[in-house]
Amino acid sequence: MSNMDQEKAIAARLSDISSVDTAIILGTGLGVMEEDIQVNKIIPYEDIPGFPRTSVKGHTGRLIFGSLENHDIVAMSGRFHLYEGYTPKEITLPIRIFKLMGINNLFISNAAGGLRPDLKPGGIMLIIDHINSTGQSPLIGPNNEEIGPRFPDMTKPYTPEFIRKAVLVAKDENIDLKQGVYVQVLGPSMETASETRMLRVLGADAVGMSTVMEVIQARHCGMNVLAISAITNNNDPDDYKPAPLKKVIEMAGVAGPSIIKIFKGVLRDISN
Ligand code: HPA
């Protein structure tokens, strides 16, 4: 079976479950969102042939099918990172499957380090553009015109209508929603002070180790994207402090509820 046939087979199997319009990637700190979903079905990744497995111990990845704000949604609990050794194609397989299932909206959350002084731990940042600093892409290799064009446009990777709606929801809910540019680095080592300076000069406002691969794939296949970072640490190269995983997880937990409110508000505001 070719990769495309395999992906179509997985999508066909999953499409039997429900007609989903929105996929949500639950980044660090958004696990609690599972409690808001009226669950129809949970499928562990290991039950989906061809699906990558998460390497994080004690955390089986799973797809959660259910409804949220009158939308049929699927949430990815557990995502894949380049630093785990997955290829960009493996990391973005779920996105291609979602598209083949007829899903057109992709909501993404992640944990990120703030590079701008006003991006403080526990805050959130709407991603309005990105910098791919990984040197990698899920689109390397022959292009499948059935999915999208060889040279996909990246003038507006984050859907302007979703950005507008997210800003309105934040205003309504009294959430201090910052906006900025997210840079994906390879990891897993954190940035040096000099790398932090470099990323600031490049125009990045927040740095993390995910999301850009998924967004490139989603845009290639024409999906609408909304992405928000949970700011877990602030990286000031002149007063640089470590950001241990414990702090990242704790602060993502502080930011999580605001991201959930915005995702839910935007969902309420878009038609199925
Ligand atoms: N750097 C890279 N990835 C991250 C950071 C950071 O400071 N914080 C959370 N994820």
Image: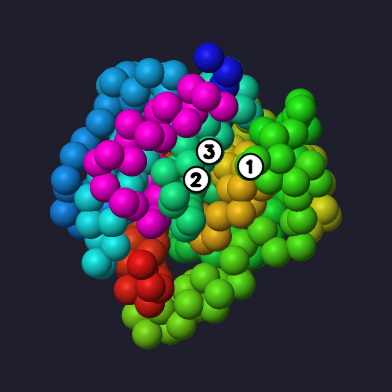
Magenta segment includes 15 = yes
Amino acid type of the residue that numbered disc 2 sits on in the rendered structure: Lys
Q: CA distance from mark 1 to mark 2?
A: 9 Å
Q: Report the residue at 19% width, 39% height from top.
A: 41
C-beta proximity under 8 Å, tags 2 and 3: yes
Residue 125, given in percent of the width and then of the height, sits at 54, 63
Badge 1 marks a residue whose secondary structure is loop
Residue 269 position (above or below residue 249):
below
Please name the residue that numbered disc 2 is placed on: 99
User: Of 108 and 22, which appears nearest the observer?
Assistant: 22
Please name the residue that numbered disc 1 is placed on: 147
Earlier in the chain: of badge 3 and badge 1, it is 3
State the image quarter where residue 65 is shown: top left
C-beta proximity under 8 Å, tags 1 and 2: yes
- Indicate which label's residue lies in the foreground, 3 or 1: 1
**Which image quarter holds the C terminus?**
bottom left
The magenta region covers 4-30
